Image (cartoon, rainbow, N blue to C red):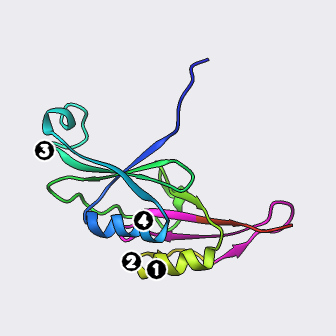
Amino acid sequence: MQQTSAMEVGISVMDLPQMLGFYTEALGCREVRRADIPAALSAPLTLAADGYLCVWLQTPGGEIIKLMAPPTAPQKLVQPERLTEQTGIAYLTFYVDDIAAVLAAAEERGATLRSERALVTEGAGAVKLGFLEDPEGNVVELVEALAG
């Protein structure tokens, strides 16, 4: 069977400084690399016609989020009321130690709460969870494991 390695997620952004601040300051990611991707590479790969700046962020768990900033800002994605109403990647999940603190930090950096603040599930493996939209409308789920 073919092996795969860690997954990376790419997010096109309109305002790189704001999004970089959100993912580093609110969600604890750290910048590990940045590079200008030329049009000669980005156009044939159907990423961007005129190249873009790519910033690689590593999550506390080791995953990579790539923030992609093209010279012309992309259109903002409009999320449906219910995430299962359209196809595609619906949200990113971050497991956190203190959902209340992360929600507060996220809102301070431009996030919008999308669900209840911290809904608690019941039974074995109970968690607190909530959904927000980052400053550009990408949906992020926060999950805090509960002791028990």
Compared across the picture, whether 82 is left or right of 46 comes to: right
Q: Looking at the image, is mark 4 or mark 1 nearer the viewer?
A: 4
Q: Crowding at label 4, few (<14), some or many (≥20) Cα neighbours within 10 Å?
A: some
The residue at which mark 3 appears reads as 50
Give the residues in magenta: 118-141
Image: 93 above or below 120: above
Q: CA distance from mark 3 to mark 4?
A: 27 Å
Residue 96 horizontal/vertical position (percent): 62, 65
The residue at which mark 1 appears reads as 107
Compared across the picture, whether 121 is left or right of 143 comes to: right
Q: Residues at badges 2 and 1 in contact (C-beta under 8 Å)?
A: yes
> For numbered disc 4, what is the local secondary structure?
helix
Q: CA distance from mark 4 to mark 2?
A: 13 Å
Q: Specify which label sits upstream in the sequence, 1 or 3.
A: 3
Q: Residue at x 39, y 77 (%)?
A: 110
The residue at which mark 4 appears reads as 24
The residue at the far top in this view is 1
Q: Residue at x 86, y 61 (%)?
A: 124
> For numbered disc 1, what is the local secondary structure?
helix
Under mark 3, the amino acid is Asp
Q: Specify which label sits upstream in the sequence, 3 or 4.
A: 4
Q: CA distance from mark 1 to mark 3?
A: 33 Å
Under mark 4, the amino acid is Thr
Under mark 2, the amino acid is Gly
Q: CA distance from mark 2 to mark 3?
A: 28 Å
Q: Crowding at label 3, few (<14), some or many (≥20) Cα neighbours within 10 Å?
A: some
The quadrant holding residue 133 is bottom left
Q: Specify which label sits upstream in the sequence, 4 or 1.
A: 4
The residue at which mark 2 appears reads as 110
